[in-house]
Amino acid sequence: MKLILNNISLLLLFVSCSSISQTSSQADNIIQNCKFVVIASPFSMRILEYVPGCYCGTRSCASNCVGINSNNDTIRVLSLCNTDTTFKISQIVFVNPQPQPKYQVTIAQYWISEGNNTFLSELERKKINTIYGNLSRR
């Protein structure tokens, strides 16, 4: 019985470590497609894609919102610890820019599933101007 419990514990530890390593590699991939820029003034944008983040605790994570501002520029807004699931495609949101954190942040990504295939959306694979900011409804 003790041997079975030890094996189950080792299996759970292995699965957790694999999950953490996949999350880290996904975050690294999206960072390559972020061109961090400085925007000082608040602005509004129309959402093209939105993925909520996770609850922050022992690690930090950010929601990922890609949209178009009033100048027709595509921009990615990363919001720390934003788990709001009510933001929708085509919704107009207000963005209050925030400084980029100096620590590692896991970034949620927009995945598309078609049949047995799962892949990143076209916008997730493009280099996009990116800022950190808080999203709110108008």
Image: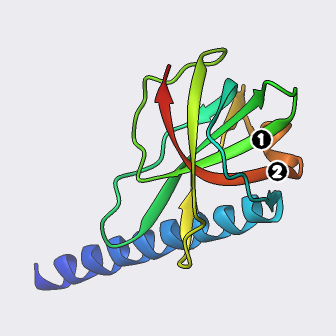
Give, as a three-letter code, the residue at label 1. Ile
Q: Residue at x 47, y 31 (%)?
A: 136
* Residue ID for mark 1: 75
Percent across and percent down for residue 79 are 52, 49
Q: Which residue in the rendered view is the most extreme toward the front?
A: 41
Q: Is residue 24 left or right of residue 15?
A: right
Percent across and percent down for residue 65 are 63, 38
Asked if labels 1 and 2 touch by Cβ distance under 8 angstroms, the answer is yes
Secondary element at image label 1: strand
Say the numbered circle drawn on residue 125. none
Q: Residue at x 70, y 32 (%)?
A: 112
Q: Which residue in the rendered view is the most extreme toward the left?
A: 1
Identify the mark nearer the N-term, 2 or 1.
1
* Residue ID for mark 2: 129
Does residue 83 sit above or below 88 in this rendering? Answer: below
Q: Residues within 10 Å of mark 2 (few under 14, many from 20)?
A: some
Percent across and percent down for residue 40 are 67, 52
The one nearer the camera, 55 or 8, is 55
Does residue 127 sit above or below 10 in this rendering? Answer: above
